[in-house]
Every structure is written in C-alpha cells, then in structure tokens.
Image (cartoon, grey):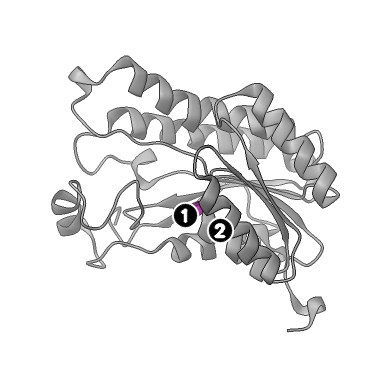
Amino acid sequence: MNVASLRLAGKRALVTGAARGIGAAIALKLAEDGADVAITYEKSAAKAKALVADLRALGRKAIAIQADAASIEAAKAAVEQTVADLGGLDILVNNAGVLFAGDFSEQPLEQIDLQLNVNVRGVFLITQAALRHIPNGGRIISIGSNAGLSVPFAGIVVYAATKSALESFTRGLARELGPREITVNLVRPGPIDTDMNPADGALAPSILPSLSIARYGQAREVAEAVAFLAGPGAAYVTGSGILVDGGISA
C-alpha cells in the first residue's frame, strides 16, 4: 500500500496498557493505518516485546515502556519517552484498565483503590502529561465501557463507576480543547473476549442472554472504532462515544 494512502501516516500514537488484549489490537490497527506507536505495559514484558516486533515488521517506529498506570511519575516519563523516540505525539489512547468483579459489600479496599487509581486517576494523569505535547488537531481516545452508561448485571459496581467517570471527563475535556480542534472521545466496549473477561469466564452465563449478537466481541472490533476516531474522518466528532457492545445496551 502506498504510504500516502495510509490514514495515519506521519502520526505518533501512545496506547496505554497495550501488551495484550484490546490495547494490543489497537496498537496493531493504528500501525496498519500508518502511525508510529508507543505502548505502555506493567508486567507483560515478553508480550510487549513481541508486539513491538510486530509493529516494526509493518515498517513503523515502535517502543514499549514499562509504566505503572496509576503513577504520575510513570505517566510523565512515558509521554516524554514517546515524544523523544517517535518525534512527537498526536494520538493518545487511554486503554489501561482493571476489573475486579464481586459483591461490593465484601470487596477489599485494595481492589477498590486499584480500579479507581488505574481506570480514573491514571487516565487523568497521562492525559494531562500528553496535552503538553499534543498539537492542534490531535486526538484523545479513552476506552470506556457500556457499563459506564448502564449496568446490565450485578458484580461490577466499582468498575462501572470508574467508567462512568470517563463519560464526564470526555465531555468536559472536549469542551476545553475544542478551540484547538483536539477531539476527545470514548469507545465503549461491551463483552470482549480478553483475559480480563474471557468468553468462557465466570461472567459469561449472565452476559450472553443480554446480547443482540449472541457472542463476545473481538478486540479487533474495538480497535476499528478507535482507528476511526483517530483518523481524519472523525475531525468533527468530539465529546462523544461509540458503543461496541453487541447490542447489550440496545
């Protein structure tokens, strides 16, 4: 394919929590569309290294950065390394997230804090750091959840609350950055077959009957929505969100 025909040719992207699952699929799709890509990971070093090799095989610059998604120091360092190695930053994808399912009345404080710190505080911190570098016309895309709009089953109280916070964050930041034509949007996955929520996992029996399309989604299907929002065709889409949830919210 001619480089000039790639929608994201010349763009530099940072995808958080991208060693596996949805994040890895997003990184691959952005690279296929022409972007150079930095990813962050916390523990999955081998998977991150393998993904970087796949990205470079597409002819892109690619780096992996070990980072604690809830640390302000790590957020700043990840952004600075991205800018240094890729030559700038045009697209930020806030993908890093954690989920602990269970009865809220018995949920340990450690699990509550980790979901708040990674899913909300971490997004705030790295977005703030990235905005020192993202130029006019840039893109900020966060991975929310259908559970941020409605909670279709029990057991995800804190997780749903964290994803709901991203709804207001997205709308508020879109207002703030509109004069710079930096768009700020959400992609809201429903049940996606990943390590966090496998199609044969404990939550599946309660989820499947609620789906219009009677299967779990694939990470690639979320990545396609992210790539649209990152591209030139979405320049007038901001403060908005795309549901990729198999109709569970219908």
Residue 80, percent from left and from top = 78, 36
Q: For the residues marked 2 and 1, what is the alpha-carbon distance in whole angstroms?
A: 6 Å
Badge 1 amino acid: Ile
Give the structural element (helix, strand or loop) at label 2. helix
Q: Foreground residue, 229 or 174?
A: 229
Q: Does the magenta stretch include residue 55?
A: no
Residue 97, percent from left and from top = 46, 38
Badge 2 amino acid: Ile
Q: Name the side, left or right, on which 242 lies relative to 6.
A: left
Mark sitting on residue 22: 1
Magenta region's main secondary structure? helix
14 up-or-down from 5: above or below? above
Check if mark 2's residue and mark 1's residue have beta carbons within 8 Å.
yes
Give the structural element (helix, strand or loop) at label 1. helix
232 up-or-down from 48: above or below? below
- Classify mark 1: residues with Cα within 10 Å, few (<14), some (14-19) or many (20+): many
Q: Residue at x 66, y 34 (%)?
A: 127
Q: Foreground residue, 181 or 31?
A: 31
Q: What stretch is highlighted in magenta?
A: 19-23
Q: Name the side, left or right, on which 21 lies relative to 85.
A: left
Could you tell me if residue 18 is visible in this image?
no
Q: On the image, which quarter does residue 108 sit in?
A: top left
